[in-house]
Amino acid sequence: MKITLILVGKTDDDYLIKGIDIYEQRIKHYLSFEKIIIPALKNTHALSVEQQKQKEGELILKNIQTADKFILLDEKGKEYGSVEFSAFIQQQMNSGIKNCVFAIGGPYGFSDEVYKRAQAKLSLSKMTFSHQMVRLFFVEQLYRGMTILRNEPYHHQ
């Protein structure tokens, strides 16, 4: 199975870029992983929040194929512990899905069209994190999940 992570806007801070790169490389030892970065919108001062979400949503949906499993990282999504998340990833792998696409939206979230296309929502916490920080947290948890599935010593119980 391949995992694709769609991001809106580039990652700004060096420490986040370095952390994301480290976990991205580690994930690739277990499965195919691709990151798609949708450029941040320009001239947003002339757009309402809804218009921004709509335009970002159109760009997100262009990167999803019909057969893809599409999961949003969303504060209202289902929460998992690390072991439960690893079981969720294993379930996706066992289901025969070729590409599991996760999306992290921009600062205002997702458009209604993106919510309608999504098959699941995942929350990393009840706390609110910046969409920049969520990128690092997600790739670390994906790596952690893969090490749990392989019984490797990264995760301690």
Image (cartoon, grey):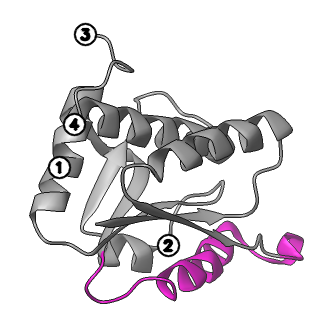
Amino acid marked by disc 4: Leu
Residue at the image position 83 percent from the left and 48 percent from the top = 12
Q: Mark 3 points at which residue?
A: 157
SS type, badge 4: helix
Q: Residue 149 carries which label?
A: 4
The crowd level at tag 2 (other Cα within 10 Å; few <14, some 14-19, many 20+) is: many
Between 4 and 127, the one nearer to me in the picture = 4
Q: Quadrant of the C terminus?
A: top left
Q: In which quarter of the image is the N terminus?
A: bottom left
- Position of residue 123 relative to residue 103, above or below, is above
**Disc nearer the start of the sequence (3/1):** 1
Q: Name the residue under label 1.
A: 90
- Position of residue 23 relative to residue 48, above or below, is above
**Disc nearer the start of the sequence (2/4):** 2
Q: Residue furthest top?
A: 157
- Spatial separation of the CA atoms under disc 3 and disc 2: 38 Å
Q: Mark 2 points at which residue?
A: 111
- Spatial separation of the CA atoms under disc 2 and disc 4: 34 Å
The span shown in magenta is 42-68
Amino acid marked by disc 1: Gln
The crowd level at tag 3 (other Cα within 10 Å; few <14, some 14-19, many 20+) is: few
Whether residue 67 appears in magenta in the rendering, the answer is yes
